[in-house]
Structure formats: C-alpha cells, structure tokens
Amino acid sequence: MKILVADKFEASGLDGLRATGSEVIFEPDLKDDALGERLAESGAEILIVRSTKVTSPILEKARALALVIRAGAGVNTIDLASASRGGVFVANCPGKNGVAVAELALGLILSLDRRIPENTEALRRGEWNKKEFSKAAGLFGRTLGIVGMGTIGREVASRARAFGLRVVAWSRSLTDARAGELGVERAESVIDLARVSDIVSVHLAAAPETKGFIGEDFFAAMRPGAFFVNTSRADVVNAAALLAALDRGGIRAGLDVFGREPAESKGAIDDPLARSPRVVGTHHIGASTDQAQEAIAAETVRIVKIYLETGKVENVVNVARRPPATHLLVVRHRDRVGVLAHVLGALKSDGISVQGMENTIFEGAEAACARIELDKEPQAQTLDGIRSGNDDIYSVSVTPLR
C-alpha cells in the first residue's frame, strides 16, 4: 500500500504509518496541480492532508486513490461530492483537538475580560495605565453560553465550571437529561441562549445547514457588553452581522477564524473583522498544540491500520447514512464457491442494484448467511430462480426496508 502524506505531519505518525508495512511518501509542500500529478504518478492509494485542499481536479487525476484522511476535524478543504462520485472514502480525526481548542477559547475569554492584548501593547509603547486596565467584570458567577456540545463544547464547559461560570448550552441533539449529565443548563434555542449569556462560545461544525447560522437575530439578542467567541469555523457566523454588532459597540469578540484567511500559513490578511479594534484575534491556531497534533497523528495511524486489516474506514464522512435500498434479501446457504455469484447473477438479470452486502460465516465454515440490500423488490420468478438454481442454497427471503 502506498501512502502519500502531502502536509506537515508528526514524526511519530510517519513512523506509525511505516510500521504498517506501507510505502510512505512524505512530501509536505505538494499543492494544487503538483499534488494531482504526484498522486497519479505514484499510484498512492491513501492520501493524508491537514490544511492542503483536495479539489475535484486533483481527485480526477488520482485513479488509484481509495482513501483521503484529513488529519484534523473539519473536512471543508476536501471536495466531498467529487470524492463520493469517484468512490473515494474520506475520513477525519474528530475530537482529538478538543482540549487544544477549548484552551484557546478560554484564553480568548480571559483576554477579552482582562484586555490582555491591549495591556501588552501599551507596555511595549512604554505606557503604564493601571487605572484604565483595572476595569474588568471578572468571570466568576457570570453566564457562558455554548453553541454546539460536541467534544470541544464539552471540554469548554468543564473548564468554564472551574472558573465558576454558569454554563448554558444549545445543540440540536441536546436533551434535558443529557444536559444534566454534562452539568449544564439547556437553552430552548440559540436566541434564548444569546439573551441569557454574558459570554458566547461557538463550537459548530462547518456544514450546509450551519452556514451563517449565527446571524443578525442572534447578535441583536446578545446582552450589552457581552463577549462573542468563535474558534470553530468562520462560515458558521454571518460576518457582516457580526461586524455591524461590533461597530454598534454593544459587544466584543474573540476570534480564531476569519472568512478571508490566506491560503498559505503565512501572508497578508484583508478581513474587516481582523482589523476591528473590538476583536481579540488569533491566527486559526486552535488545534495547533503539540499535544493535539500527536493525538491526531495517532488517530490517523489507527484509521490506516484498520483500513489495511479490514477494509473498513473509521470516521468516514461521505458514506450514505441511509443507502437508497428498499428491500433486504436474506440467503442462507452452504459456504461453497459460486453460491453468491449465482445470487448476484440472478439479481443482475432482474435489473436490480445491490446497495450493500454482508456474508456471515457460521462456526465451522460449513454454512453462511448473506444479507443483501437491494434498490427494488425482486420479481417472484427471480426469487424462484435463486432458490432452485443452486443446490447449496437453504432458503431465500425478502422483506421491505421502508
């Protein structure tokens, strides 16, 4: 198996990949056309990236490619639609950067409250202004609203409680019972959360349904003097609405993500939010700790090992959650050569597409049971042909899935 690592990657991860017996090609500076050409030339079957974009033209050149692993959580830099059309699995490493991002979120909150960046800038100018910078509300007893209670949101909540913050949370899947288990209060809606929070921290994944999710109504509902923190993805926030809210002077923001970030890790940035005097900003560094990157490298190696050993992809993000199968065909049979070929041949003759299949072998390897998901119901004569056309078939049954 050939693995192309086209981004920065920890030495421990490279060692782990080589330990699988795979040929590892480490070329961290590959981008755009050069990446597509290298994939085509090398015949790599697995591609590992961090921030490098994997576009449709790149995927079209990579005829041997079977798996792309994003060594991180978000997959917005990978063309999922193109990968799916080409039968290429895409996996990620969710939750492994949770602690790192949570630590930065708390750092931004503290920086907003105690105005740490402004303190530092004044000192570097040779100015001492204790009177001005002594003005801070403090965190103890205030309310933190968390939007999104995945791994990172939960890590933020646990650290916030240590600061004595009351934590209110909203997530589509959050129930009162689950909120109780996590030690948070559940808000009925994000607007309700905005109304009761002194600080809001956003931890939503980038997805079509979350694009611009935090907008004008949300900022209008926030309390005067509140802090807004985003360490997730820039796209989940309506940037114009946030900028307008900042310009009105009602809130301040701590941001690690911006809509106009440079494509490279170093360069100029032209983003009005980054220039706003009411923003404390960092350079999209939420997951950039040694601890987080080591954890992500280990998870990447784990995904590769399982794929090599079983053909299964852990953390896959582009497999249909509910395949378009309408019927389940169950065939109990002797474990003999040609049985499944006979069944599949009959289905092909009936114009039926197989959406999924699993063949379970019984103890002793004498018998097996095949469960085959179909896109339509087989005709009666097809089922009869399957039953009567092979002496190694015990029984055949079909049931609707919907």
Image (cartoon, grey):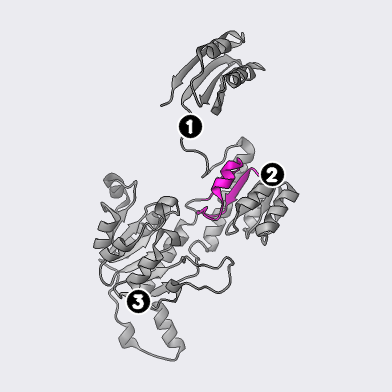
Q: Classify 10 Å Cα crowding around label 2: few (below 14), some (14-19), many (20 and above).
A: some
In the figure, 193 relative to 370: above or below? below
Amino acid bearing label 1: Pro
Disc 2 + disc 1, Cβ < 8 Å: no
Quarter holding the C terminus is top left
Start-end of magenta stretch? 65-93
Tell me the tag on residue 324.
Answer: 1
Q: Which residue is mark 2?
A: 63
Quadrant (top left/top right/bottom left/bottom right) for the N terminus: top right
Q: Are marks 3 and 2 in contact (CB under 8 Å)?
A: no
Which of the 4 image quadrants contains residue 349?
top right
In x, y percent, where is residue 240? 39, 67
Q: Residue at x 45, y 52 (%)?
A: 207
Q: Is residue 354 above or below residue 121?
A: above
* Residue 199 appears left or right of 321: left
The residue singled out by tag 3 in the image is: 114
Q: Amino acid at mark 3?
A: Arg
